[in-house]
Image (cartoon, rainbow, N blue to C red):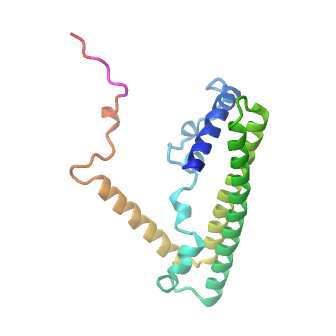
């Protein structure tokens, strides 16, 4: 609970200055959808779920279904261990900065520069952990043969289909067609 609170606090404190720094005319900012990519393209949201299916430990857990060789298992286990160590180190560093930020916040008038410094350092540490996991997933994908990658892709596709079926169930509103998304709804005219 405290961690979520401090994260929200840090994001709120940084939002104003960051938004002010990024305020540029829309024509100067590259718009991915103008480059032929939709909002779900890799350039906008990142690879997302595509990475998750290649987490080294998940692949090791499915070694029989994938038909992994002992060498592949050893390499994937090493990648999983490296990613865990990098993640643990980054989380410890981030926690130190979040704790210092929480102490600063207890002051009647926190030093804005120290708040910014600790918040940015914590966020950079967390980003480092995410990058380590992304790199480990890419390396794990490279360990697999084409046939094994095909199986993993099939599992990912099946998972997306199950999710879509849940979204489309009767009684559950799934995605609304664009013509029905009118926010905010205009008031009734009489």
Q: Is residue 165 left or right of residue 46?
A: left
Is residue 119 visible from the viewing direction of this image?
Answer: no
**Residue visible at 66% across and 69% down in the picture:** 84
**Looking at this view, is 28 or 85 the one in front?**
85
**Residue visible at 30% across and 58% down in the picture:** 165
Residue 86 vertical position relative to residue 39 in the rendered view, above or below: below
Q: Position of residue 110 (x, y in %)?
A: 73, 32
When asked about the image quadrant of residue 111, the answer is top right
Residue 189 vertical position relative to residue 180 in the rendered view, above or below: above
Which quarter of the rendering shows the C terminus?
top left
The residue at the far top in this view is 190
**Looking at this view, is 189 or 144 the one in front?**
189
Q: In the rendered structure, does residue 49 fall within the stretch colored magenta?
A: no
Q: Position of residue 30 (x, y in %)?
A: 64, 35
**Residue visible at 73% across and 46% down in the picture:** 100
**Residue visible at 56% across and 47% down in the picture:** 4
Q: In the rendered structure, does residue 185 fall within the stretch colored magenta?
A: yes
Q: Is residue 157 left or right of residue 109?
A: left
Majority SS type along the magenta span: loop
Q: Position of residue 129 (x, y in %)?
A: 68, 59
Q: Which residues are magenta?
A: 183-187
**Looking at this view, is 11 or 167 the one in front?**
11
**Looking at this view, is 104 or 39 the one in front?**
104
């Amino acid at each position: 609970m405290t961690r979520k609170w401090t994260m929200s606090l840090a994001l709120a404190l940084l939002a104003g200055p960051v938004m002010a720094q990024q305020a540029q005319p829309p024509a100067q900012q590259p718009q991915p959808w103008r480059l032929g990519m939709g909002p779900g393209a890799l350039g906008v949201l990142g690879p997302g779920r595509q990475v998750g299916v290649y987490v080294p430990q998940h692949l090791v857990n499915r070694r029989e279904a994938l038909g992994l060789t002992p060498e592949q298992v050893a390499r994937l286990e090493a990648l999983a261990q490296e990613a865990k160590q990098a993640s643990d180190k980054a989380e410890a560093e981030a926690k130190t900065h979040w704790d210092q930020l929480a102490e600063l916040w207890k002051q009647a008038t926190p030093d804005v520069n120290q708040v910014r410094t600790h918040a940015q350092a914590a966020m950079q540490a967390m980003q480092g952990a995410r990058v380590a996991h992304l790199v480990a997933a890419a390396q794990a994908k490279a360990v697999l043969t084409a046939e094994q990658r095909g199986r993993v892709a099939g599992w990912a596709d099946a998972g997306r289909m199950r999710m879509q079926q849940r979204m489309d169930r009767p009684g559950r509103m799934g995605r609304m067609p664009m013509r029905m998304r009118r926010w905010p709804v205009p008031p009734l005219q009489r």
